[in-house]
Structure formats: C-alpha cells, structure tokens
Image (cartoon, helix red, strand yellow):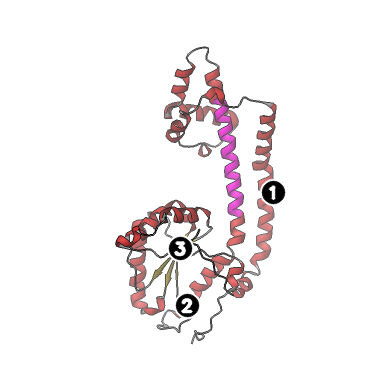
Amino acid sequence: LNRLEAAALPSPILKRVTLVDSPGVLSGEKQRDRGYDYNGVVTWFAQHSDRILLLFDAYKLDLSDEFKDVMKLIQAYDKKVRVVLNKADGVSPQDLMRVYGALMWNVGGVIPSAEVPRVYIGSFWDRPWQNTGMLDLMEAEENDLIEDLVTMPQNNVMNKINEIARRARVVEAHTHLLAHLRAKVVAKWYGKREEQARLCTPEGLLAAYEQVQREHDLSRGDFPLPSRMASVLRAYDFTDFYKPSVERSKKLKALRELTECDIPELITRLHSVQKRRQASKASIVEGFRPLRNVRPPPP
C-alpha cells in the first residue's frame, strides 16, 4: 500500500465509478525489479473490480511479455474485459482498419474466448482531432464507453444478486453432500477408513453427487469438480462433519426460501426500476460526458 496513490479530479463520471490505474507494463529485465508481486496485485484487482479496461495505442500494439502475462491472469474474468483502442485519430481510416485487425489478432492469441471482447475505438484526450475521416464512429464509440461505465452500478446490482443466488445454491449442495458422505461412513460397523477412501475418489464422488442431486432436487452445476473435491476431502475425517439437526434443517429451509422466493421477487423489483431508468438513459449519459477544454467541437 505504500506505493498506492490517489487523486481526485472534477470529472462527472467519477461520481459513478472509481477508476484504478494499474502500473504500466514493462518489458525485459525491468519487469523483474518492481519490488512487489505485480501479478498478485493485478489478480486481486481483477477479482474485485466490475470492469477491466485494456488500453492500446493505435500506433503501438506490441505486447510485452508482462502484458501477455497480465492478459492471461484475467482470462477467468473475461466477461469483465473491454478493450480500448486509444488515439485512433492518429492514423488514417484505411490504416485504422488494419490496426483494428492486428489488435484483434493479438488479443485473440492471448485470450482464447468464444466471444470477442468489446472494443471501443476513439481518441480519449483533449488534443485537437488529427484525422477526422472516422470522427462520427469515434464519437459514437465514446458515447458507448461512457454509457457502459455510467450504467455499471445498476448492472452490477443484478450481478451481485446472481452471485448471491449462486453461492446459496453451492452452500446447499455442499451441506447435503457432506451430510451424505458422513452418513455413508458412519453406517459402516467396520471398514470406515476403506469406505472413506472409496468416497474420496472422482468415481466415488460422482456417484455421491448423483444420489444427492436426485434426493434433494439440486443442479449438477452446483457441485465442485470431483477431482478437486476428492483431493480436499482426503484431509478430513467424515465422522467429524456436522450431524443432521433441527437447527440445520431450519437454516436449509431458509436458504431454499431465499433462492425460490426472495431472490425472484428482488429481481422483479429491479427490472421495474431499470425500465423507469431506461427512458432517461440518454440524459444520464450526456450528463457524464468528459469536460474538454482544448479539443474543438467536431467540424
């Protein structure tokens, strides 16, 4: 944290979002002399951020080794990733098409994804326009980027609701699974250790998943990978897992009510709010356009 600095600027969009600018990526030996775990810091911010912007200059698309490492680190968060092609007015419209193609080739070679990240093309600074052949496109792209950032708090509410629902389902699946595993081992008069060893295999867990899923009407996607779960369970004694109790049953009932009643009602209310805000979206975006003091208006 002793390397972290903060700045407050009179920019309208900062009323809605907080921007975290990561240190510039380095190349060669320089990237090994930062004095802290750069990849660890990037991963932490990627986990806790709502949007990840990868910035490229139109005249500098080379990817250093460190930049490639960063892009690989955020593969797990590809739905958050947006690409910004900055200073696009520095090249002619014909060259811009070539630059865009090269950018997509470079990004696609590092982040293999079925869905290509959204790319915003523009010139995001105050300097006068250089090539105005693609001016309408760059103005429209800037509006789209502003809209994406400004509406992110509302969209993030839905993401948080979905995450709460996902975690609730995972907790329910884990609770029933551990109770099932404990019951299997406790039911053996002898050979408890052998039974636990049998269950701590991908095949044994798959059979347990199927039985628990069928008994409690759960989704297969809410269970962890059998190989990963088997390696974790080997460190525990199944007989030490919590016994079924009235208190646990009440908590599981409350958890099921959360996923089946409370969350759907919350989503319905949120949709109503979003419909009311949809009509005023244009004015909201216009109110958060950047304040430029140098760049002249479009010709």
Mark 1 and mark 2 in contact? Answer it, CB < 8 Å.
no
Q: Which residue is drawn at 50% across and 12% down?
A: 190
Asked if residue 112 is positioned above or below residue 255 in the image, the reply reads: below
For the residue labelled by badge 2, is the local secondary structure a helix, a strand or a loop?
A: loop
Asked if residue 165 is among those painted magenta in the image, a careful observer would answer: yes
Q: Name the residue under label 3.
A: 22
What separation in Å lies between label 1 and label 2 (alpha carbons)? Answer: 44 Å
- Neighbour tally class for label 2: few under 14, some 14-19, many 20 plus, Cα within 10 Å: few
Q: Which span of residues is magenta-colored?
A: 158-180
Query: Image quarter for residue 109?
Result: bottom left
Q: Where residue 184 sits: x, y (%)?
A: 53, 20
- For the residue marked with disc 1, what is the amino acid? Glu
Which residue is denoted by mark 2 in the rendering? Answer: 125
**Magenta segment main secondary structure:** helix
At label 2, the amino acid type is: Trp
Q: In this view, does 72 lie above or below 5?
A: above
In terms of secondary structure, where does tag 3 sit? loop
Estimate the x, y position of residue 125 in percent, counting from the top left: 47, 77
